[in-house]
Image (tube, rainbow, N blue to C red):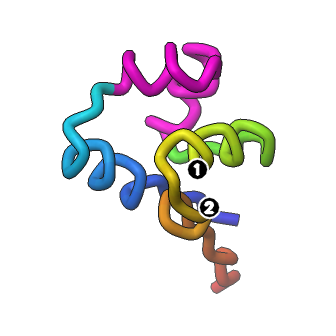
């Protein structure tokens, strides 16, 4: 699976929210934020906390695609 959080980063810019503010307001760890920065998998609980704080759906902050084998 390939994970992509570009929607989240754009939403933070649009709402003028820093990553630090997001982390503090949602209670997610710096490790989770770092994983997201590297497009790695994070827990559904983390995604739910972020979506709730931003007032949006999970699909507004996250997208995944299956990797096709060549």
Range of magenta residues: 19-38
Q: Residue at x 37, y 56 (%)?
A: 6
Q: CA distance from mark 2 to mark 1?
A: 6 Å
Q: Nearer the viewer, residue 46 or 39?
A: 46
Instruction: Check the picture and name the quadrant holding the C terminus.
Output: bottom right
Q: Foreground residue, 19 or 36?
A: 19
Numbered circle sitting on residue 51: 1
Which quarter of the image is occupied by the N terminus? bottom right
Q: Residue furthest front?
A: 55
Above or below, 66 against 40 in this view is below
The label on residue 13 is none
Q: Secondary structure at mark 2?
A: helix
Q: Is residue 65 magenta?
A: no
Q: Residue at x 49, y 66 (%)?
A: 60
Spot occupied by residue 56 in the image (x, y as percentages of width and height) = 52, 60
Marks 2 & 1, CB-CB < 8 Å contact: yes
> Image check: 3 left or right of 6?
right
Does the magenta-highlighted stretch encompass residue 20? Answer: yes
Q: From this view, report whether residue 10 is shown above or below residue 43.
A: below
Q: Which residue is mark 2?
A: 58
**Dominant SS type (magenta):** helix
Tell which of 21 and 30 is nearer to you: 21
Instruction: Give the SS element for disc 1.
Output: helix
Residue 39 position, x and y percent, is 52, 46
Rendering quarter of residue 68: bottom right
> Where does the image place residue 67, in percent across and percent down from the top left?
65, 75
Q: Where residue 25 appears, x then y in whole percent?
A: 51, 20
If you read the primary sequence from the N terminus, does the residue marked by circle 2 or circle 1 appear first? Answer: 1
């Amino acid at each position: 699976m390939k994970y992509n959080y570009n929607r989240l980063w754009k939403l933070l810019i649009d709402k003028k929210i820093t990553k630090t503010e997001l982390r503090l307001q949602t209670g997610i760890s710096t490790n989770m934020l770092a994983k997201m920065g590297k497009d790695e998998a994070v827990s559904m609980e983390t995604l739910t906390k972020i979506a709730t704080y931003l007032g949006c759906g999970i699909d507004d902050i996250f997208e995944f695609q299956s990797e096709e084998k060549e």
